Amino acid sequence: MDFSDYKGIYVIGALENGKIQRVTGELTGEARVLADQLGEKVEVILLGGELTDKPESLISLGADDVYVMTSPVLDHYDGKAYQKALAGFLKDKKPDTIIFAATAYGRDLAPRVAAELVCGVTADVTELAADKDKGLVIWSRPAMDGNIMADIVSPLFRPQVGTVRPGIFKYPKADEMRTGKVIDVPLKLTADDLGTILKKVIQGEKEENPVELAKIVVAGGRGFHSEEEWRWVHELADLLGGAVGCSRPISELGWEPHSRQIGQTGKGISPKVYIALGISGAMQHMCAVNADIIIAVNKDPKAPIMELADYAIVADLKEFMPLLIEKIKKAKAEKRD
């Protein structure tokens, strides 16, 4: 089929209270990598009620053009209104690829838009690659209950559409020498375009040191057998200035909130250092980890995490954790003196 009219990799940006969400920068940087391989431009669409951040910041992260689409009607996410604002614009532009963030809003909006564009959606992607010979984006995501990684392509339809997990990709370094355009797109929306009526907004509590933003993450899994032992994870994280994370079993036990769960059914992280304590390293967990350095402690030398780790330590946590914490405390005390 001839898809020569379909051009550009479009990132659907996420706004919150007028601010550009971090995931938009992550996806812009990754789109730049794909675009350079496929010979495409990176186009970012910022859609929301208002924009208080500078859209030019996304040009320095890899965007060629930033389209700003704002309206008071879009102040709070509404699938019907967002779909109307976005679908017609994309029909005219004919993108080759559209990338949404796999947030609650993105997961709702992507299939709405794809239905109008008559194409499919690859959901909850954790890896992106390019087939330069065929001009295809390769969307990779866990499948078969997390036991395999599936590579999904769309050779017969355009645009290619997918939702990508937040926190999986590194936030790109800004290149202030890059140039591009910011384009305001007028919207004609009214309250009649809304699918729901917002009565009240109940603000949730903001988490201190969220795991998806931390440079150091200390996470634990099944290797801990009691809440008393689990306190070592918090103590180590405090000593290192890191955030506490966990695998799914720990969250299910109630030792940590779901917001700290890492993995296919939790959050994606991209820290500089990831310390995995008593975590087996199953694909369901590791598909959400993109760390510069992985340090694993496990009493099973054959655990999958040991092959993935940059530094693998075979030890029993009951013996290892008190010794490690004592050593770090001693080193910090000596440094102060």
Image (spheres, rainbow, N blue to C red):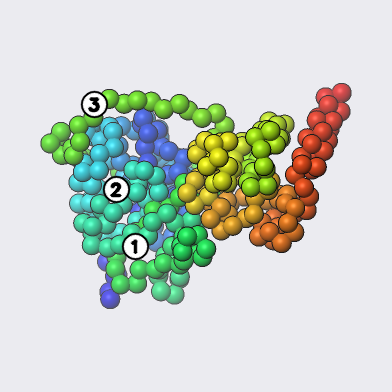
Are there few (<14), some (14-19), or many (20+) residues within 10 Å of tag 3?
few
Residue receiving disc 3? 199
Cβ atoms at labels 2 and 3 below 8 Å apart: no
Query: In which quadrant of the rendered view does residue 322 lie?
Result: top right
Q: Which residue is mark 1?
A: 160
Q: Residue at x 39, y 39 (%)?
A: 55
Q: Amino acid at mark 3?
A: Lys
Amino acid type of the residue that numbered disc 1 sits on in the rendered structure: Gln
**Residue 63 as seen in the image, left or right of residue 108:** right
Q: Residue at x 42, y 44 (%)?
A: 24
Q: Where is residue 11? Give x, y as percent.
A: 37, 50
Image depth: mark 2 or mark 3 in front: 3
Number of residues whose C-alpha sits closer than 10 Å to that of mark 2, classed few (under 14), some (14–19) or many (20 or more)? many
Element type where label 2 sits in the image:
helix
Give the spatial CA distance, label 2 vs label 3.
Answer: 21 Å
- Foreground: disc 1 or disc 3: 3
> Which is closer to the viewer, label 2 or label 1?
2
**Looking at the image, which is closer to me, 18 or 283?**
283
For the N terminus, the image quarter is: bottom left
Rendering coords of residue 155 (x, y %) = 34, 72
**Secondary structure at numbered mark 3:** loop
Q: Position of residue 103 (x, y in %)?
A: 39, 44
Residue 151 shows in the view: yes
Q: CA distance from mark 2 to mark 1?
A: 15 Å
Label ID, residue 109: 2
Task: Mark 2 or mark 1: name the one nearer the start of the chain.
Answer: 2
Asked whether residue 214 appears in the rendered view, the answer is: no
Quarter of the image holding residue 227? Answer: top right
Disc 2 marks which amino acid?
Leu
Is the residue 63 above or below the residue 242 in the image? Answer: below
